Image (spheres, rainbow, N blue to C red):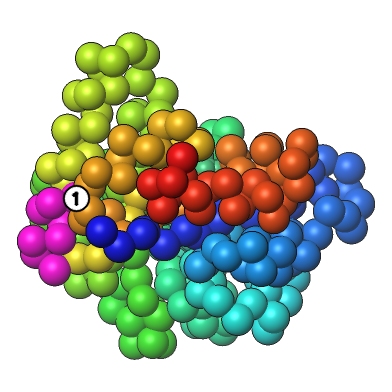
Amino acid sequence: MKRPRLGINVDHVATLRQARGTDYPDPVAAALLVLQAGAEQVTIHLREDRRHIQDRDLAVLRKVVTGHLNLEMAATDEMVGIASQYKPHTSTLVPEKRKELTTEGGLDVCQGQKKIKKVVEKLKNEGIRVSLFIDPDLEQVRCSQDVGADAIEIHTGCYAEALGRIEQKREFVRIAKAAREGQEIGLEVAAGHGLHYKNVAPLLALSEIVEYNIGHSIIARAIFVGIEKAVREMKDVLAGGK
Ligand code: PXP
């Protein structure tokens, strides 16, 4: 079975920088190191409130990242303008609430179908691949196809936070069904949020998931073992080696 791609969310490096208003640690430096350690993609979320990643980070990353750059963004005119300017390889549309600690749920594509379709069209016209971050829900998967997305990223937050085996199994089944449906209707399927070295392992049985975007657990581990080792350890897990 082919090993899924690993995208690393380096927002958490920027969060540490913004906590002190310093110019370090630099998420751009982190991005280069994670690519050197074998990650296939760098993921950043330019939030409307700029709480971690800044416009400067995107501008520099776009110049220096040779691997795939995935820009998570809200479906707003401002963000579509920024994406059109910098042209990341992928734009992943995510819902955004100002007060949330992190992205709390998937995008309601069915509810916002008309607006999201327009945003998807604009981005695709700029040559940007478009992915939609959605809950593991069959209706959301089908609506994602209806609005013309190239890919979906399944929100794994509920799976990651599940209390006990029964709840985790239930969430696993939801993810499995959504991933299968996505693949069957021609969408590329990614997954992410709240995944760490242990809880990602059972998901590897789902061959439909071809990409994982993981940030917090890897950057947290990097504090103790260094970023390159932290990335390589996750790559080993994704290879089924540990
Ligand atoms: N994918 C998306 C769409 C996200 O919003 C996030 C969190 O920023 C991630 C993946 C990575 O989540 P985590 O940092 O919990 O690994």
Magenta residue check for 180? yes
Q: Can you tell me whether the CB of the residue at mark 1 lies under 8 Å from the nearest atom of ligand 1?
A: no
Q: Dot 1: within a 10 Å radius of its alpha carbon, few (fewer than 14), some, or many (20 or more) residues?
A: many
> Does residue 108 show up?
no
> Does residue 176 show up?
yes
The main secondary structure of the magenta stretch is helix
- Image quarter for residue 145? bottom left
Where are the magenta residues, as a range?
179-186
Q: Is residue 237 left or right of residue 60?
A: left
Number of numbered callouts drawn: 1
Q: Is residue 181 left or right of residue 32?
A: left
Whether 47 is drawn above or below 150: the answer is above
Residue located at (46% from left, 53% from top): 213
Q: Position of residue 221 (x, y in %)?
A: 67, 38
Q: Position of residue 166 (x, y in %)?
A: 23, 14
Query: Which residue does the numbered mark 1 point to in the structure image?
Result: 179
Type of amino acid under label 1: Ala
Q: Position of residue 202 (x, y in %)?
A: 31, 35
Whether 60 is drawn above or below 240: the answer is below
Residue located at (76% from left, 47% from top): 226
Element carrying mark 1: helix
